[in-house]
Amino acid sequence: MRDLANDSARGARTAAIAFGARVVGDGVTVRPGCGRSPGPCRARWALLAVASPFGVRGGFGLWFLSYLVGLATTAAAVLLLREGLRSADRPARFLNIGAAHILCLWLPLTAMTAMYGGFGQGLVSLAAMAVPMLGNDAFRTAFAALPGVVTDIRAAVGRELTALRERS
């Protein structure tokens, strides 16, 4: 979504464009059905995270911590996707949540790398992911805004839990 204006101007066929995202003035519009389209992909990521320990030999060890990190960040990515789609009308918040979503999608991969390849390979994988992100001004700006985003999401989760309790 960050590169949508540039990609659209150059005729690129990115996933965001294919799902109907369009640049309108200084903002971005997302087709109403767009939120459902990436769902199967996210479900596959979650399934991969849940099933990954079955390929590890030797029982419990430090890999289990990697597994928990992978599950937690996959769950966070799903929550961020939901909150991001709800924030499509607020471009700054939408972009900040998008950066956090990208980070949460990468972290399970680095955790699985550590699970299968060991701590050293996990660190190399994390560095390979983080260095380009930290070199990008837009990501640095978005990551600086994350404490506010986390507070907003925590409040949204609290509201959802309250609503669930009231329904039951």
Image (spheres, rainbow, N blue to C red):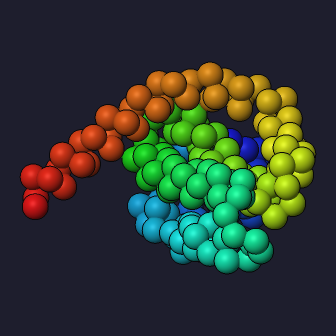
Residue displayed at 55% across by 28% down = 146
Count of number-bearing discs: 0
Nearer the observer, 118 or 22: 118
Q: Position of residue 13 (x, y in %)?
A: 75, 64
Image quadrant where one finds the C terminus: bottom left
Kindly tell me whether residue 18 is visible in this rendering: no
Seen at 81% across and 64% down, the residue is 116
- Identify whether 122 is placed above or below 158: below
Q: Residue at x 32, y 34 (%)?
A: 155
Q: Say if 2 sits above or below 33 in the image.
A: above
Identify the residue at image location x=83%, y=49%.
119
Q: Is residue 52 above or below residue 127?
A: below
In the image, residue 18 lies at what x, y percent?
Answer: 64, 66
**Quarter of image, res 71:** bottom right
Residue 122 shows in this picture: yes
Lateral position of residue 54 relative to residue 159, left or right: right
Which residue is nearer to you in this view: 105 or 120? Answer: 120
Q: Position of residue 66 (x, y in %)?
A: 68, 54
In x, y percent, where is residue 115?
76, 60
